[in-house]
Amino acid sequence: MRLLVLGDGGFLGYHVVAEALQMGHEVSTFNREGGAPLDGVEALQGDRQDDLTALRGRSWDGVLDTFSDPDAVGETARLLSGSVGAYGYVSGISIYHPDGPSVVDEDASLRRPEDDTGDDPLQERSIAKIRCEEATQMYFSGPVVTTRVGIMVGPRDPTDRFSWWPVRLARALAEGGEVLAPGDPQRPVQFSDARDVAAWMVGMLAAGTPGTYNAVGPGRDDLVAEVLDACRLAAGEVDGGEPEPVGVTWAAEEFLREQLHEVQEEERPLWFPEDQIPFQKVDSSKALAAGLTFRPAYETARDTLSWVRSRPGGPELAAGFSADTERELLRRWRARRG
Ligand SMILES: NC(=O)c1ccc[n+]([C@@H]2O[C@H](COP(=O)([O-])OP(=O)(O)OC[C@H]3O[C@@H](n4cnc5c(N)ncnc54)[C@H](OP(=O)(O)O)[C@@H]3O)[C@@H](O)[C@H]2O)c1
């Protein structure tokens, strides 16, 4: 397949390029820098907002689009209609209506622009994503594969929401001390290794079968305590030592919310205060039946830790706490419990 990836320099886009190359596809990319993320890629330069010249008169078998501006997505879909086989659009699960069912599948109701959502930061972004989904259906004449993703993690994740855990547990293995963990250890968590979503989307575009899919991992009930333990074992493997047990203190969600009310969601290590999750679970069985698979958390943790340590920007994390903050939170939690 000849695949056009709009963007690519980000997180998911990069993995789409890497997975497509690995599968033997030909890849072109399009971004403002005009740089290729990997060798063997045709790099096209332009701007989604006002310069699509490099895409004119060209043809591909598939295109992958992660953009969130409905006008720009509509314009690209219109331009590529007839010259590209299948359009892959990356949307997100935040488009589902917060008052919908507790388990959302692809038929669950969506947010509406007229909803009064107060200062919900997801409302505006989600309405834009819905408009983008509509634009691809309206302007692209061929098959459209729409993938609604959730929290994506793994190497190149700019948020470090997951990366915090293998890094923190590696430090605990090396230095000892207690690790602060959020809420109920038996709570299932949903997250996807972006490489798994990327590989599956490339396969779906190659097949050219239209459809809308939730693609939220891990496709099994991973409990947060199990994920943290997978991170501990992975850290042990990366650092070559025996992964000794680590002391983990689980502090109540309510306590953490109260203590960290000024910390943005993006800066908190992988957990979601209950009042921010409008639904209990995302049902991705349709995508799983269409071949989506997720690697074990252990593998994601191992690769993420190695990537954090070798990344160009350095190992400093965008999410998590300083050692002092964590110690103080542990002290307050113990005092609270008496
Ligand atoms: N990460 C998550 O947990 C999560 C959760 C839910 C949904 N999502 C969705 O998943 C997708 C993530 O994709 P990603 O990480 O690859 O995206 P990204 O980081 O947002 O992609 C940025 C890419 O787009 C290019 N770009 C930006 N503005 C452009 C313009 N005007 N013209 C041309 N190219 C432009 C950038 O290159 P230049 O700067 O060089 O132009 C870069 O290559 C998004 O749709 C996001 O909404 C993510």
Image (tube, grey):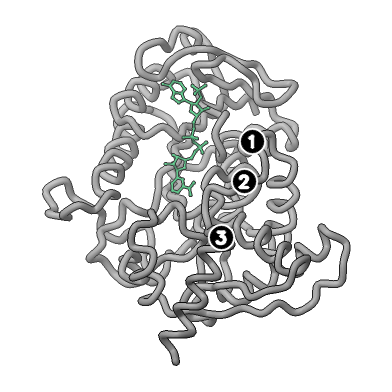
Q: Is residue 220 above or below residue 31?
A: below
Q: What amino acid is found at the position of numbered circle 1 in the picture?
A: Gly
Mark 1 or mark 3, whichever is nearer to me? 1
Quarter of the figure with residue 259 = bottom left
Q: Earlier in the sequence, mark 1 or mark 3?
A: 3
Q: Residue at x 11, y 48 (%)?
A: 114
Which is more toward the observer, 225 or 318?
318
Mark 3 neighbour class, 10 Å CA radius: few under 14, some 14 to 19, many 20 or more: some
Residue 288 numbered tag: 3
- Residue 285: in sight, yes or no? no
Mark 1 neighbour class, 10 Å CA radius: few under 14, some 14 to 19, many 20 or more: few
- Residue 284: in sight, yes or no? yes
Q: Image quadrant for the C terminus?
A: bottom left
Give x and y (percent) for residue 244. 80, 76
Q: Which residue is mark 1?
A: 313
Q: Which residue is mark 2?
A: 316
Q: Earlier in the sequence, mark 2 or mark 3?
A: 3
Q: What amino acid is found at the position of numbered circle 3 in the picture?
A: Leu
Which is more toward the observer, 147 or 258?
258
